[in-house]
């Protein structure tokens, strides 16, 4: 079967797939994204590749030396573990929303985007080259569902 025939087969079966839940594959993809967000904390770079600015001298004086964006590790935990109590996770059949719960960690948005004297230290993103791996994770988890509904 060539790609055109496969696409036609999927198109003909789309009604079956529209009623199917992809919660598990979406959750696996979200976990993969969270791992890549963790990598961003290690790289200490924005999505553009620009390095995060270092701590201000006053921050070091008040809190001592510590890794950027990890004074208490609370924000890091919420950003890199979708099951963390301070993370936001809503899983539907066709979509998933995850990230840091802004009511639990209100300073996360300021750290991500910058505000006033706080420089932006963009951490919550997935690089394009990593997104291909996330898509592979989703596809691998979704294929049993597709095979069961389309090819059974």
Image (cartoon, rainbow, N blue to C red):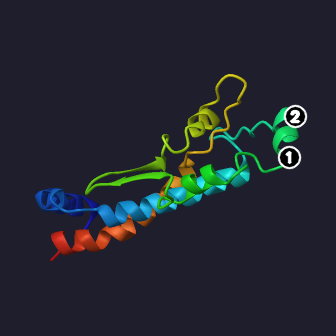
Q: Between disc 1 and disc 2, whose residue precedes? A: 2
Q: Is residue 144 left or right of residue 39?
A: left
Q: Are marks 1 and 2 in contact (CB under 8 Å)?
A: no
User: Camera-side residue: 41 or 11?
Assistant: 41
SS type, badge 2: helix
Residue sitting at the far top? 116
Residue 133 visible here: no
**x, y percent for residue 16:** 13, 62
Spatial CA distance of label 1 from label 2 is 10 Å
Dot 1 corresponds to which residue? Answer: 64
Q: Residues within 10 Å of mark 2 (few under 14, many from 20)?
A: few
Quadrant for the C terminus in the image? bottom left
**x, y percent for residue 12:** 12, 59
Q: Residue at x 58, y 40 (%)?
A: 108
Residue sitting at the far bottom? 152
Q: Is residue 151 above or below residue 49?
A: below
Q: Nearer the viewer, mark 1 or mark 2?
A: 1
Q: Residue at x 78, y 36 (%)?
A: 53
Q: Residues within 10 Å of mark 1 (few under 14, many from 20)?
A: few
Dot 2 corresponds to which residue? Answer: 57
Q: Residue at x 62, y 52 (%)?
A: 74
Q: Is residue 107 above or below residue 66?
A: above
The numbered dot on residue 87 is: none
**x, y percent for residue 91:** 33, 56
Quadrant for the N terminus in the image? bottom left
């Amino acid at each position: 079967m060539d790609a055109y025939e496969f696409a036609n087969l999927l198109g003909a079966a789309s009604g079956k797939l529209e009623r199917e839940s992809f919660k598990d594959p979406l959750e696996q993809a979200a976990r993969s994204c969270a791992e890549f967000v963790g990598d961003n904390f290690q790289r200490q770079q924005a999505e553009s590749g620009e390095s995060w600015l270092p701590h201000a001298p006053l921050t070091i004086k008040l809190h001592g030396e510590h890794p950027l964006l990890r004074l208490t590790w609370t924000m890091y935990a919420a950003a890199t573990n979708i099951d963390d109590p301070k993370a936001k996770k809503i899983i539907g059949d066709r979509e998933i929303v995850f990230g840091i719960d802004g009511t639990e960690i209100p300073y996360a948005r300021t750290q991500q985007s910058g505000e006033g004297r706080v420089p932006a230290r963009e951490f919550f993103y997935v690089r394009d080259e990593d997104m291909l791996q996330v898509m592979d994770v989703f596809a691998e988890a979704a294929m049993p569902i597709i095979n069961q509904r389309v090819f059974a």
